[in-house]
Image: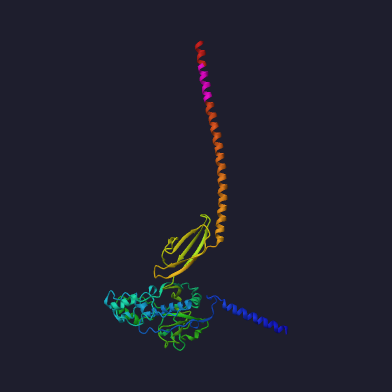
């Protein structure tokens, strides 16, 4: 009976610990499992770029979409057309061939400085290059104000770093070789062991169309991995040495691969020599972030408070602007906490910052002030003693000088008298 009671207590405690651990688990995962699929955590749409050479745009938007959904819980459907067209030089372009629809479908703007709008505002389709469409793109509401990329360029840390990125922040952009000869359709596995140098010029319409027709360069999004994915799944005439592969999401529709996905070996030469990247942080339109800190400065005997924002804001009354995004203010005595509302100069976004410095800090400031006063008094006393000592020395030296001067005067007088008497004695003789 006692044994059953102990077992029951143990099970209750174990269950409680399990529940407690689940509730209070941190959002960021650090332990890396041997297998992971981002689709088990978030919904990921399967896209189809069709005949357009927009793979980079599709891979980039998918990287953003999965980041925002994973970290913010917001399911955005971004427009690849907007990313491709909005920064393009051929929108009303400098030469006629850049305004050709066929050529434009092959070109993609610089995705790293691209703009992001929703697909409902700019649907993925061909757009004629005219003033109406140009204004449509210029006036389209963007949703991303700023972002930072997470670059994976250290080969010895690349695999684990990418895995952590996918688990915590969503998909990772990858450049690869999509030549059919590296693909095993029966297992949807890709392994390439030849690095192709595709240095080309895209200065004419013909060069662009030829490049699109012949290139095997491609961009996809890594959304998972399997460390035990068998090397035997790759083509028999070209296999990696070890097991393990990335789960990639393509932009060729659900009919390609396994519902739009495939596997790329960890040892694929394009992966080893490329620089994949994910999203480190994103600031959406309407978001404004600010941080309040303070520190006690013993030299000035004040508490210096600081508000740092992630973009320019309207001036804060009573605070000194230290830089574009930093405001300072000095406090010398305790005050009741208060709230400041900040407003972005870029899009009018607002946020609130609580200005709160504990009284203990001012007690320290007061104590430091008292210590400083005592030190100042002691220093003043020491200086007074030094001044008195100097005055005594100066008085002594002054008296000594007087004695010397008088002595010299008496000596001179004696010598004069002696000379005078000597002359008188000679004259008498």
Of 41 and 297, nearer the camera is 297
Res 287 → quadrant: bottom left
Does the magenta-highlighted stretch encompass residue 411?
yes
Measuring from the top left, give residue 193's x and y in whole percent.
44, 80
Does the magenta-highlighted stretch encompass residue 157?
no
Measuring from the top left, give residue 349's x and y in whole percent.
42, 70
Of 261 and 346, nearer the camera is 346
- Is residue 218 visible from the viewing direction of this image? no
- Look at the image and give the residue range highlighted in magenta: 409-420
User: Residue visible at 51% across and 18% down?
Assistant: 419
Q: From the viewer's perspective, tell me whether residue 211 is left or right of residue 418.
A: left
- Is residue 185 visible from the viewing direction of this image? yes
Total marks placed = 0
Measuring from the top left, give residue 23's x and y in whole percent.
57, 78
Determine whether 29 is above or below 320 in the image. below
Q: From the viewer's perspective, tell me whether residue 36 is left or right of residue 250.
A: right
User: Residue visible at 56% across and 48% down?
Assistant: 377
Q: Which residue in the rendered view is the most extreme toward the right?
A: 1
């Amino acid at each position: 009976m006692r044994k059953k009671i102990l077992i029951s207590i143990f099970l209750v405690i174990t269950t409680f610990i399990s529940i407690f651990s689940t509730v209070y688990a941190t959002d960021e995962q650090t332990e890396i499992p041997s297998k992971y699929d981002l689709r088990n955590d978030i919904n990921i749409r399967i896209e189809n770029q069709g005949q357009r050479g927009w793979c980079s745009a599709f891979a980039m938007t998918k990287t953003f979409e999965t980041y925002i959904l994973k970290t913010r819980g917001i399911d955005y459907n971004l427009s690849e057309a907007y990313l491709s067209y909005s920064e393009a030089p051929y929108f009303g372009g400098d030469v006629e061939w850049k305004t050709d629809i066929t050529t434009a479908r092959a070109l993609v703007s610089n995705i790293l400085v691209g703009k992001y709008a929703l697909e409902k505002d700019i649907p993925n389709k061909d757009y004629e290059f005219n003033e109406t469409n140009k204004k449509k793109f210029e006036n389209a509401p963007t949703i991303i104000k700023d972002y930072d990329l997470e670059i994976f360029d250290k080969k010895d840390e690349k695999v684990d770093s990418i895995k952590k990125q996918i688990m915590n922040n969503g998909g990772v952009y990858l450049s690869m070789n999509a030549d059919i000869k590296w693909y095993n359709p029966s297992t949807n596995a890709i392994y390439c062991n030849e690095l192709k140098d595709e240095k080309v010029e895209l200065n004419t319409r013909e060069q662009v169309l030829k490049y699109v027709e012949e290139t095997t360069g491609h961009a996809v999004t890594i959304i998972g991995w399997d460390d035990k994915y068998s090397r035997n799944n790759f083509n028999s005439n070209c296999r990696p040495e070890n097991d393990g592969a990335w789960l990639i999401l393509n932009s060729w529709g659900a009919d390609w691969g396994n519902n739009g996905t495939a596997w790329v070996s960890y040892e694929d030469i394009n992966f080893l020599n490329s620089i994949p990247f994910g999203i480190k942080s994103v600031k959406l339109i309407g978001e404004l972030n600010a941080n309040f800190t303070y520190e006690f400065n013993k030299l000035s005997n004040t508490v210096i408070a600081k508000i740092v924002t992630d973009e320019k804001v309207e001036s804060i009354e009573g605070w000194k602007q230290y830089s574009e995004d930093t405001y300072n203010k000095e406090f010398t005595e305790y005050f009741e906490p208060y709230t400041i509302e900040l407003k972005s100069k870029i899009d009018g976004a607002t946020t609130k910052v609580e200005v709160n410095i504990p009284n203990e800090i001012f007690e320290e400031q007061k104590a430091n002030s008292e210590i400083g006063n005592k030190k100042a008094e002691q220093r003043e006393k020491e200086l007074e003693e030094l001044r008195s000592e100097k005055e005594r020395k100066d008085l002594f030296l002054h008296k000594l000088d007087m004695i010397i001067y008088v002595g010299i005067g008496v000596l001179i007088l004696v010598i004069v008298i002696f000379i005078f008497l000597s002359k008188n004695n000679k004259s008498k003789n």
